[in-house]
Image: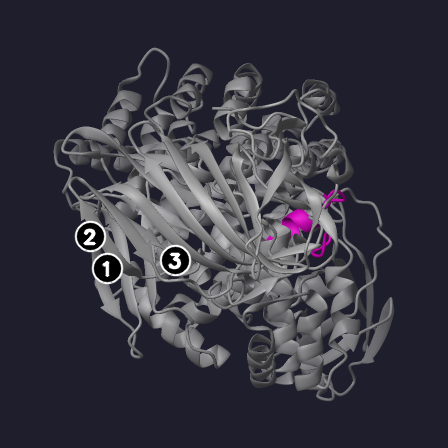
Amino acid sequence: MCLLKKCLSCFRKPGASSSQTLPPSTEPTIHFQGQPRLPKFAVPKSYHIHLTPDLSACKFGGSVSIHLDILADTRFIVLNAAQLSINPGSVSFSPQNSSKVFEAFKVGLVEADEILVLEFAETLPKGMGGLAIEFKGILNDKMKGFYRSTFEHNGEEKNMAVTHFEPAYARQCFPCWDEPAFKATFEITLLNVPSELVALSNMPVIEEKVNGNLKTVFYQESPIMSTYLVAVVIGLFDYVEDHTSDGIKVRVYCQVGKANKGKFALDVAVKALGFYKDYFHMPYSLPKLDMVAIPDFDAGAMENYGLVTYPEAALLYDDQHSAAANKQWVATVVAHELAHQWFGNLVTMEWWTDLWLNEGFATWASYLAQDELFREGKIWTQFFDRESSQGLGLDGLAESHAIEVEINHASEIDEIFDMISYKKGASIIRMLQDYLGGQHFQNSLASYIKRHAWSNARTEDLWAALTEGCDEPVSKIMNSWTKQKGYPVVTVKMENQTLQIEQSQFLYSGSRGDGQWIIPMTFCCGDYDSRKSFLLEKKSQTHDMKSFFSDSDKSNDPARSWIKLNVDQIGFFRVKYDQALAAKLRYAIENNYLSVTDRLGILDDSFALCMARHMSLTSLLTFMGAYRAELEHTVLSNLMKITDKVGRIVADAKPELMNDIKQFFIGLFLYSAEKLGWDPKQGESHLDAMLRADVFTALAMLGHEETLDEATRRFHAFLDNRNTPLLHPDIRKAAYVAVMQKVSSSDTTGLENLLEVYRDTDLSQEKTCVLDSLASCPDQGIILEALNFALSSEVRSQDAVFGLAVRYEGREVAWKWLKDNWDSIWTTYDSGFLITRFVRSIVSPFASSEKVKEVKEFFASRTTPSIARTLKQSIEQVQINAKWVRSIRKEKGLAEVVKKLTISES
C-alpha cells in the first residue's frame, strides 16, 4: 500500500492495466498546489460510498461514485484525499447522457495540500456525470479520519471503527470535496461487517444482508450536507431508546453493560430537541438521532448529522459514582451538539472563517436550552464564569485573533477551534440578543434558519436577517466585534454628579491598543430598577446623574449610591472604576446588594486589571476580602481560579509572603466549607453540590491541615469499601488531591493507592479525576512519575492532558519532560487540538524573560501551522507574567497588607 507522498503521482495510460505505473512527475499537480480552496469547475451533488473495514487488520478498502456537475471546460478534476492509496486504474468519469467513459490519464497526489489531481486526455463535457475511484486506507490511531478505538469485552481487548471528520478529515476516509460549501447527499454502504457488531451511520438502515459471520449494511440517502458531518461507527454496543413528541427515535449507544449510564443524556436529548424545534421554529430534520460514547475521542464531542459522537465522560452519567459537575457537563455537551443540528448541520458556514457561526451559536444555545431544562442551575451566571470570562482571558492577548479569521490552508483550521470562536462568539451573541430584545432576536433567527436551510451562510447573512427583523443597524454594531480582535475596557469616574465613560482596548500586556467598538452599554445606580441602556459609539461619553440622585440622602447613602456598569455582565468588555466608585461597590458586595453575576464580574475584572498592572496586587487582595462571606458557587469558583494564579505569581515575586497569602486564601473559603460540610444535605441545590466539590479541593491544594486530615480519613474508608457514603463522588477529587499532598519519593503509598483506584474503575470520569489529582503533589520526583504515567499505555491518549495540572513547584520538571518527550507526543497526537493543550498548559505558567528565550529556541525548528498561534499566545502569557512579577516586587506595603488580611481572616 502506498500512502500519500509529496507530489507523488501514479500514471496510467488509457487501456493499460491498473498495476502499471510510470515514473513520478509533478506535471498534473503543479498548477493546483498551494491554493487555500479547491477550484470550482466541478461540483459534487451526491456520493455513493462503499467501505469495507477490517477491524482485525486495522485497514479498510472502499470505492466512491460521485455525481458531479462539470461547470467549465476542463481536463482536470481536483478534489481532496489524504493518507489514502488510490487505485489509478479505477479512476474514470462517465457523462450522464453518454456511453463514453473518460479514463484518467494521470492521477496525482499532493501530500502538502491533501489534494488529488485527476488529468484526462480530453476536455470533459459540461453537465452531469459520474466520477468513480477505488482506494485503500488504514484505520489509524490518531482519533481523526477513519480510526480505531479499543474497548474491553469479557476480558479481551477489541477494536471499533469510528469516523471523526471535522474540520478536514473526511479526505482520510474517501476522496471528496472536503470543504463545507460543497454540500451533497451521501448514500453509504458498509461491507463485510462482523454480524454481531452494530453498524451506524447518519441515516437509518434500510437493509442488512447477512452472509455467515459477515453482513452488508445499506443506509438511506442523506439530505444534502457537508463532508465533515458524514459519520460511521462500528462496534459492540448496548443502547437505551426514547422518542420525541413528534416521533423522532433517539438512542444512546455505549459499551455493553453501561446502557443505564446513558439515560440522563437520553432524557436531555429528547427535551433539547423539542426545545430547539420550538425556539427555532423548525423541526429536527432527520428521522433519527443516535448518540454514541466512544472510548478514544479527540474532542469535546462531534455533531455528525444524526450520529453524534462523544467521549464517554461527556455522555455517560453514573448516579452512584459521578459528581454533580459531571452531570452538568453531560447536559452542556449534549445541548451543544444538538444545537448544531440546526446551527452547523442544517445551516452551515460557507468557509472556516465563519466557524463561530457554528460554535459560538451552539455554545450560546446550549445555555439557552439548559436554562429552560434546569431552572435551578443559574445557568446564565455560570455562562459568564465558564464562557465569557475565559473568552475575555484569551482575547486580552495581543496574539489573539478576530472572530472572523482568514484561513489559507487546511492545516490552520484546527487552531481556531478555540475560546474565541466558542466563548467570545457565544458572548457577543448573548450581548446582541439582550440589546435587540429576546423575542425580536428569536424571530429573526428563525427567519435566518428558514432562509438558509440546507445551504451555507456567512456572518453578513446573519446580520442581514437580524437587521431586517429588528430594525437595528446590526452590521454596523457587530462588525467591530467580529472583524477586529480584542475588546474594550471602559473606564468610569464620577465628577459633579456627571458620569464620565471612556473606552480603550484592553491588553494584558498593559499596552494601549487602537481598537474601538460600538458597545451596548447598561448601568444601574443603587438598585436594579434604575437600569439605563445606550450605545457607546464614541471613545468617550458623559451622563448627567442628577436624576438618579434627586434624593440628596441617596447620594450619601452607600447602600443606594453605588453604580454598576455592564449590568449582569452581559457585555463583552471590562470596567475600571475610579477609587470612589470602587469603594462603594465593595460596600455593596459585602452587604449583598449586587446580583450574583455582578459580584462575579467585578471580581473577574479586578483580577484582569491587576494582571495588566492597572491595579496593584495590594488593591486586588484587599478587594478579594469583600468575598469572605460568599456562598455562591460561580463566584467562589472564579475566586478559586484567581487565588491559584495569584499564588503562583506571588511565589515568583515575593516567595517570603507565601505562607501568609495561603492563610488569607484559606480564610476566604472556610466560611463556605463550614456552611456546606463534607456530606450532602437533603434537598440541597445542584450548585451547592458543585461548590462542596470545589471548595474542599481548593482547601486541600492550599494545604489546610484539617481538610487534609478529614479527606485522607474518608479516602481510606473508600479504599476499604468503594460504596462507602463517607466519600461521595462530589468530594473524591478533594480527597485525591489531599492524599497527593502527603506523597513523597520516600513514601509513595498514597500514589499507589490512587493508581489502584484508577485501574479498578471503568468510569472515564473517575479516571480523569484521578489523573487530574496526581500532578498536584509538591514532590518533583512524584510529579515526573505522574507525567510519565499520563503518557503510558494505561492512559487513553485523549486523557493525558488531564495529567498536566502540575503545581508551581513542578513547572521546570514539566518543561523538561515536555522537551524530552516532544517527539513521542507529536507522533501520538499528530498535531491537532490536544497537542496545543500540552503547549499551553506547560509553557504559560512561567514568568521570566529567560524562559521566553528558552521556549523560542526549543520550538524554533518544531513549530507548525497547527500550533503556531498557541505557541505565540503562550509565550506572550509568560511575558505578561514576567512584567506582573516585576511590578509586584516594586509594591510598597504589600507585606503589611497581606499580614493584616491574614489576621483579619483568622
Residue 469 against residue 711 in the figure, above or below: below
SS class, disc 1: helix
Pick whichever, 477 or 191, lies toward us.
191
Residue 725 against residue 829 in the figure, above or below: below
Name the mark nearer the viewer: 2 or 3.
Answer: 3
The image shows residue 58 at horizontal and vertical percentages of 35, 29
* Residue that mark 2 sits on: 259
Task: Write down the region rendered in magenta.
Answer: 391-408
Q: CA distance from mark 2 to mark 3?
A: 21 Å
Kindly identify which numbered label has been placed on residue 727: none
* Mark 2 residue type: Ala
Whether pointer 2 and pointer 1 mark residues with C-beta atoms closer than 8 Å, the reply is: yes
Q: CA distance from mark 3 to mark 1?
A: 21 Å
Among the 4 quarters of the image, the one containing residue 727: top left
Name the mark nearer the viewer: 3 or 1.
Answer: 3
* Residue that mark 1 sits on: 263
The image shows residue 700 at horizontal and vertical percentages of 38, 36
SS class, disc 3: loop
